[in-house]
Amino acid sequence: MGKKQQYLTVDGRKIPVSNLEKVLYPGGRVTKAQVIDYYLRTAPVEWDELATAMDKEDVESLFFGVEDIIERLRRVGDLFKPVLTIKQ
């Protein structure tokens, strides 16, 4: 019998995911689920957001869920985009 289908809900849409236990980086035994979690937790912040969090001593405001990240993308755009054009 096959495994039960799993979903990640993003912006009200159910996105099918599979093989979350699959090891993607064998050296560190990092799974697909851990990679997804990492990308969600490492969303970039703007300097003013960092300053506000420090002033309010509210580090929790710098952590985002899936829905938060979608809203941030709509509001501020992709903060990593400028990195793609930097010449080194």
Image (cartoon, grey):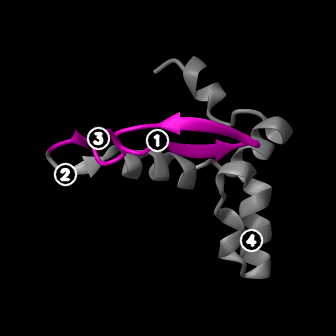
Reading the image, the residue beneath label 4 is 53
Lateral position of residue 72 relative to residue 62, left or right: right
Q: Quadrant of the N terminus?
A: top left
Tell me which residue sits at (74%, 52%) in the image: 68
Labels 1 & 2 near each other (Cβ < 8 A): no
Q: Which mark is residue 1?
A: 3
Q: Nearer the viewer, residue 54 or 27?
A: 27
Label 1 – label 4 distance at C-alpha: 38 Å
Label 1 – label 2 distance at C-alpha: 26 Å
Amino acid on which the number 2 mark rests in the picture:
Gly
Q: Secondary structure at mark 3?
A: loop
Q: Secondary structure at mark 4?
A: helix
Please report the bounds of the magenta region as a residue range: 1-26
Amino acid on which the number 1 mark rests in the picture:
Gln
Q: Secondary structure at mark 2?
A: loop
Tell me which residue sits at (19%, 51%) in the image: 28
Q: Which mark is residue 63?
A: none
User: Which mark is in front, 3 or 1?
Assistant: 3
Q: Residue at the far right: name it.
A: 75
Sort mark 2 into few (<14), some (14-19) or many (20+) by Cα contacts within 10 Å.
few
The answer to whether residue 39 is seen in the rendering is yes
Q: Residue at the far bottom: name it.
A: 57
Q: Earlier in the sequence, mark 3 or mark 4?
A: 3
User: Which mark is in front, 1 or 2?
Assistant: 1
Q: Earlier in the sequence, mark 1 or mark 4?
A: 1
Q: Residue at the far left: name it.
A: 27
Q: Earlier in the sequence, mark 3 or mark 2?
A: 3
Tell me which residue sits at (73%, 50%) in the image: 67
